[in-house]
Amino acid sequence: MPYIRFLRITILFIASGLGAQSMFSQQQDSSTNARKAKEYFISGTTLQIQGNRHAEAILEFQQSLRYDSSVVTLTAMARSYREINKLDLAFETVQRALQVDQSSRDAWELLAEIEILRGRYDEGLAAYERILELQPTKRQLYTLARLYEPRNAQRAIEIFERIVATSPDVAMYMRLSSLYERVKNTKERTRVLESAAKLAPKDPQIAAEQTELYVEQARFDDLRSLLTTWNYGLANTEAVTDVWLVSLSRILEDSLITGLYASEVSSVVDLATSVIPSAWPVMAMAGTISMSLQDTTRAATCFTLVASNDQVIPEGFLEVGRIYAVNGMQDHALGYLSRGRLKYPNDVRFPIIMSSMYTDLGNDRQAIIELETASIMDSSVVDVWVQLGMLYDRSKRIQESDQAYERALQLDSGNALANNNYAYSLSLRRIDLDRAQSMAAKAVRADETNAAFLDTYAWILYQREEFSFAKNYITLAIRYGGNATHFEHYGVILKALGERKEAIKAFEQSLELDPDREWVREELESLTK
């Protein structure tokens, strides 16, 4: 019927109108919820940024979650929980975030951080590994590589290599260099250093490490090529010097390299004298290398450049003197030190060191003259007075020796060597044994394993007829030293204790070490009759 049909149409129209109104209402509610969620989220992040308002930020994030449970809001709230050290709540919240969206790199990264803070290092690494599947940022890859570095160098290498494959970076190459060094892969370490050098050709650290590897691999062509570019044409002359010193030091410390590649090493020395002759530390090192090759002519060329350099400081002359002295060329050493003293007449180190060399040469008279000069230049150097005391004593200038030791002890009453030497000198003269014993005891307390100090103390105890104590200390002297004098004193002490057989053995050991001890031989003969 037409009426019924009209009624149906009317009902459908009304129903359709109600449905549209309901749909519009739902859309309006959704829009409102999104707006409110956004407002609370913005408020929370604003508080979070301020740094000390994370508890308030959490309340705002909770309000936001009433309207929209987004992964971003949950992750932000978990981060605030972490900041206030609520790690369990932070863990639960970030887990909720990952339930919403497992593709969130930020959520996985935060989970990794939380796990590590909870002491769950492996779980933290596992969480970071998930980021690798989600197009990680360079920063996230770097963080994961750093996490692997302490435990798994190879895995860290793989990730750093992934970074530099798409984004070459000097810092990453240098981390790779350190890692390849750990796993003893010289070839790959050389490769990444060369890659780093292309990005930063004038970085001294990179160049220095390259030179070390070139020396290690005996790649002298590459070494010379690189060193040629490090000259004083560059602005940073200190860096240039450092790169050369690293390479030359590496050569000097590797006796296999200097032994097998002497001509190649000499060519590096020659390169140094032509490229960087005004760097006296480099010339000193180059001369030292030549001395190790027994090439005194090349060494002299280098050392002449040191001495003639206007910028050379006292250490240059002192170093050349030391190198010649170590190689037994005392005359050359004294010659360079004399030149240094003329240039720096107020530097007390020159006469002190020259005195030591004259002593080694057996020229006590000249050694004393040098020390007396040093004492006038600076009367506060304790070692000068100690050495003067010893040399005066050896030269039978006893009164001057005593005065020198007294001066040393005025400057430093606890000086072990002054106390020991002075005490021994007094004991040989058998005078002032109370003071001698006190000084010897002080020296022993300062160094309880010094055989010379123990011997002095034992000998003074013997002279005071404290034979048992003397035996204890001379036994210690033999344990830590055991020279001919120690065994001689041991025999005398044992004889005083009536231990005839042991005394004979001690005297025999003394003669084995020094057959020229006639007094010991006479004692031994008297005991064996």
Image: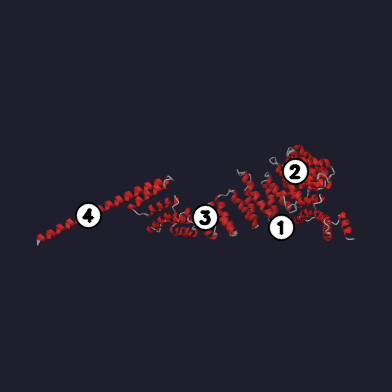
Q: CA distance from mark 4 to mark 1?
A: 96 Å
**Comparing marks 4 and 2, which lies closer to the viewer?**
2
Quadrant where the N terminus sits is bottom left
Q: Is residue 168 above or below residue 422?
A: below
On the rendered structure, is 33 left or right of 254? left
Q: Residues within 10 Å of mark 1 (few under 14, many from 20)?
A: few
Q: Are marks 2 and 1 in contact (CB under 8 Å)?
A: no
On the rendered structure, is 111 left or right of 328? left
Secondary structure of residue under mark 2: helix
Using the image, tell me which numbered label, if any, was put on residue 42.
Answer: none
Secondary structure of residue under mark 4: helix
Dot placed on the residue nearer the N-terminal end, 4 or 2 = 4
Dot placed on the residue nearer the N-terminal end, 1 or 3 = 3
- Kind of residue at badge 1: Gly
Q: Which residue is mark 3?
A: 146
Q: Residues within 10 Å of mark 3 (few under 14, many from 20)?
A: some
**Comparing marks 1 and 3, which lies closer to the viewer?**
3
Q: Residues within 10 Å of mark 4 (few under 14, many from 20)?
A: few
Q: Can you give x and y, in whole percent of width and height, for residue 274 in the image?
A: 68, 47
**Comparing marks 4 and 1, which lies closer to the viewer?**
4
Using the image, tell me which numbered label, if any, was put on residue 20.
Answer: 4
Scheme of image coloration:
secondary structure
Using the image, tell me which numbered label, if any, was put on residue 383.
Answer: 2
Using the image, tell me which numbered label, if any, was put on residue 259.
Answer: 1
* Residue 337 visible, this angle: no
Task: Residue at 61% x, 53% y: name it.
Answer: 210
* Residue 215 visible, this angle: yes
Dot placed on the residue nearer the N-terminal end, 4 or 1 = 4
The foreground one among 38 and 40 is 40
**Comparing marks 2 and 3, which lies closer to the viewer?**
2
**Comparing marks 2 and 1, which lies closer to the viewer?**
2
